[in-house]
Image (spheres, helix red, strand yellow):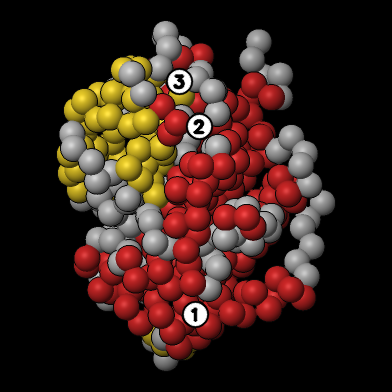
Amino acid sequence: MLPTFTEDHAIFRHSVAAFVGQEITPYVTELEDDGQVPREIFKLLGGLGYLGVRLSEEYGGGGQNFLYTTVLLEELVRCGSVGVAVSIMAHAEFATKVIDRAGSDSLKARFVLPATSGDMIGALGVTEPGAGSDVAAIRTKAVRDGADYVINGAKSFITNGSIADFITLAVRTGGEGHGGVSLIVVPLDGPGITKNRLRKTMCHASDTAELFFDDVRVPIENLLGQEGEGFRLIMEGFEGERLVLAIIACSQMRMLYEAAKNQGIEREAFGQKLLGYQVWQHRLADVLTKITAAETLTYRALNMYVCGENANAEISMAKLFATELAHEIAHECTQIFGGMGLMEETAVARLARDCNGFTIGAGTSEMMRTIIAKSSGLMA
Ligand SMILES: Cc1cc2nc3c(=O)[nH]c(=O)nc-3n(C[C@H](O)[C@H](O)[C@H](O)COP(=O)(O)OP(=O)(O)OC[C@H]3O[C@@H](n4cnc5c(N)ncnc54)[C@H](O)[C@@H]3O)c2cc1C
């Protein structure tokens, strides 16, 4: 029922942990202040093969399954800035994996290869000012004109939006509804594109932007698969994205718990360690129990996913449970820090703040409940 992590995964984990400890953790405050992950980090990660763990070997990837992505992600979160992990996953997993899955050889050579090496940064553009949860309602239009598509419209809340070199863009090439949606890879350095960085209350190190497309021309060959296949490709991709967010939430909670436990051992009040009080022993025992439940649910969904089973409902349960629970765990674990838990300089304050947003991104908690209800015969 749960995935088996081998000795090879352990070696990989050790290498990623060493890299993160040396190249990312010391600079986390800077990255949070800059509001973006610098290109050099993508290049370093690409050079080590980390950006392409799940991408095709022909295009520089490692050809591995999601277990390696899980290890990478868990260790990236350990830098203490969840935005770093979000930015890297939005590039490798959200924007590029779908090109690797559905793109032509020429598209893979032009985008997957440089994305794997870190020479290009990618973003995924689905959400619009007027269409978030309801993906089938997107309005950004791509109209054929000779050998090109001409794109007009807007996208919002796009991770890596202002730093990316390309965007895997959901557009309407056909009529109303999900059957008219396609995915097109759009380079972001051409004319007609305006980028506006947005300021978020969480994940400060991951860049988020709104993008406007005004008569943007891209060759027809930049289409992924066939016209009208976009909605299916987006829904398939959502499984990986939701697993990413469930795993991030579990890793965040684990770190919050570890920090709270240390605080309980180190901090004294009224002549006694905080963990000398039964109230804190019990509160943290509850925290640990709930985190273990979230991890077990998430790993179970992960195992089904890597085994090729239909894991849609289980992934939705994991994403729903872990991301909602993270709010409660963040509250419990910052409470033991007293005033220090609210100071910008502390890792727990940042981790707690970064828990916000994951009940929204890649499908809201309400959408997760709808998927679970649908697959469980709960819709009378
Ligand atoms: C940090 C962050 C990063 C993101 N990165 C990206 C990205 O890289 N690319 C991208 O395309 N998008 C991205 N998004 C957007 C994200 O996918 C959307 O915010 C999300 O899908 C919800 O859409 P919305 O914000 O328009 O909310 P809406 O869809 O308008 O929903 C508003 C509220 O109504 C509820 N609701 C909607 N429909 C129903 C219903 N039928 N029944 C009950 N309740 C309902 C929702 O659950 C929610 O609570 C990101 C969002 C965040 C917060």
Query: Which of marks 3 and 2 precedes in the sequence?
Result: 3
Q: How many marks?
A: 3
Q: Is mark 1 within 8 Å of ligand 1?
A: no
Mark 2 and mark 3 in contact? Answer it, CB < 8 Å: no
In the displayed orientation, state which residue is furthest to the right. 1
Please rate how many residues cluster around mark 2, counting C-alpha atoms within 10 Å: few if below 14, some from 14 to 19, many from 20: many
Q: CA distance from mark 2 to mark 3?
A: 11 Å
* Amino acid marked by disc 3: Val
Q: Residue at x 45, y 48 (%)?
A: 110
Looking at the rendered image, the disc whose residue lies closer to the viewer, 2 or 3, is 2
**Secondary structure under badge 3?**
strand
* Residue that carries the numbered disc 2 in the rendered image: 224
> Distance of mark 3 from mark 1, alpha carbons?
40 Å
Q: Position of residue 85 (x, y in %)?
A: 44, 61
21 lies above or below 79: below
**Residue holding disc 1:** 19
Give the residue type that dot 2 points to. Leu
Q: Is residue 86 visible?
A: no
Q: Which labelled disc corresponds to residue 181?
A: 3
Give the secondary structure at mark 2.
loop
Say the numbered circle drawn on residue 136: none
Q: Earlier in the sequence, mark 3 or mark 1?
A: 1
Which callout, 3 or 1, points to the residue nearer the camera?
3
Please indicate whether residue 110 sits to the left or right of residue 276 in the image: left
User: Can you tell me whether the CB of the residue at mark 2 lies under 8 Å from the nearest atom of ligand 1?
Assistant: no
**What residue sits 64% from the left and 62% below the top?**
62
| Image position, residue 199 (x, y; %) | 21, 50
**Residue plotted at (40% across, 69% down):** 43
**Tag 1: amino acid:** Phe
Residue 355 position in % (x across, y down): 41, 55
In this picture, residue 173 sits left or right of residue 153:
right
- Contact, CB < 8 Å: mark 1 with mark 2? no
